[in-house]
Image (cartoon, grey):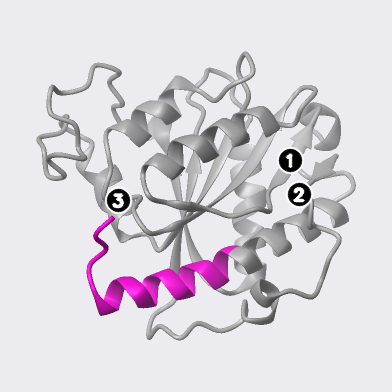
């Protein structure tokens, strides 16, 4: 089990403000299940993380499973950066709406060949303004690296989309040894602590960026 670099610290500006939001409604966190592979482990990780979100209390969680709708790899000639309201495939409207309504994101990603899944890249590339000026955290899982290589690449991608990726993350190397047959962690304390640190940081940025977007439209 590896965790984010700051997961063993407890005093920071992010953690000091995680329990309350200046907004008049709960912060909305979209938890994106990035894998659509047959036999995928992503839903197990998503269930565990959604429970951590509920325990944390700063967000309401919306688990967005990319396997639930179409994600064609063939993109339109005009990118969403140019035409944010471009026509999208039938069945994608729900995904677009849920991304637009989110105040923050956590992307759950496996690592395929030292990178992240094509399904996740497709979901990213079909959208643009939905990501802008919003914070994004990550939970990775894989064999040896725990998804860290996929996470680092995703940080580069989301930077191009004017999103803010937080420093802390959760990582499950050799995840198949860490969870039991019922999908429960055998030793839950360390990953739960890492999740809290990340959610603390994510809540701070979500508060700040939600307030900023409410004052004036983002013009990046």
**Which labelled disc corresponds to residue 130?**
3
> Which residue is under mark 2?
4
- Secondary structure beneath dot 3 equals loop
In percent of the image, x 40 and y 83: which residue is there?
Answer: 23
Q: Is residue 11 magenta?
A: no
Tell me the crowding category of disc 3: few under 14, some 14 to 19, or many 20 or more residues within 10 angstroms, Cα based.
Answer: many
Earlier-in-chain disc, 3 versus 1: 3
Q: Residue furthest front?
A: 220
In percent of the image, x 44 and y 76: which residue is there?
Answer: 26
In percent of the image, x 57 and y 63: which residue is there?
Answer: 202
- Secondary structure beneath dot 1 equals strand
Look at the image and tell me whether residue 179 can be seen.
yes
Look at the image and give the residue range highlighted in magenta: 202-220
- Residue 197 position within the rendered picture, expressed as x and y whole percent measured from the top left: 72, 63
**Which labelled disc corresponds to residue 171?**
1
User: Could you say which is closer to the camera, residue 165 or residue 69?
Assistant: 165
- Residue 14 position within the rendered picture, expressed as x and y whole percent measured from the top left: 65, 72
In percent of the image, x 47 and y 75: which residue is there?
Answer: 207
Q: Is residue 21 left or right of residue 100?
A: right
Earlier-in-chain disc, 2 versus 1: 2
Q: Quadrant of residue 203?
A: bottom right
- Secondary structure beneath dot 2 equals loop
Tell me the crowding category of disc 2: few under 14, some 14 to 19, or many 20 or more residues within 10 angstroms, Cα based.
Answer: some
**Number of marks present in the image shown:** 3
- Residue 220 position within the rendered picture, expressed as x and y whole percent measured from the top left: 28, 55
Q: Is residue 216 above or below residue 110?
A: below
Give the Cα distance between marks 2 and 3: 26 Å
């Amino acid at each position: 089990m590896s965790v984010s670099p700051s997961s063993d610290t407890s005093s920071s500006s992010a953690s000091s403000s995680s329990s309350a939001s200046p907004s008049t409604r709960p912060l909305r966190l979209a938890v994106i299940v990035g894998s659509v592979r047959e036999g995928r482990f992503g839903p197990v990780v998503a269930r565990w993380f959604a429970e951590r979100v509920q325990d944390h209390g700063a967000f309401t969680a919306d688990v967005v499973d990319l396997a639930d709708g179409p994600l064609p790899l063939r993109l339109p000639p005009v990118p969403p950066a140019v035409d944010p309201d471009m026509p999208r495939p039938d069945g994608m409207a729900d995904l677009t709406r849920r991304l637009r309504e989110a105040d923050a994101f956590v992307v759950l990603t496996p690592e395929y060949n030292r990178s992240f899944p094509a399904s996740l890249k497709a979901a990213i590339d079909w959208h643009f303004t939905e990501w802008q000026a919003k914070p994004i955290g990550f939970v990775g899982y894989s064999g040896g690296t725990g998804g860290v290589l996929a996470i680092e690449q995703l940080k580069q991608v989301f930077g191009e989309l004017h999103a803010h990726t937080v420093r802390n993350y959760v990582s499950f190397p050799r995840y198949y040894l860490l969870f039991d047959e019922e999908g429960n962690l055998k030793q839950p304390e360390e990953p739960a602590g890492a999740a809290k640190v990340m959610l603390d940081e994510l809540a701070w940025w979500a508060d700040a960026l939600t307030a900023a977007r409410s004052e004036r439209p983002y013009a990046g």
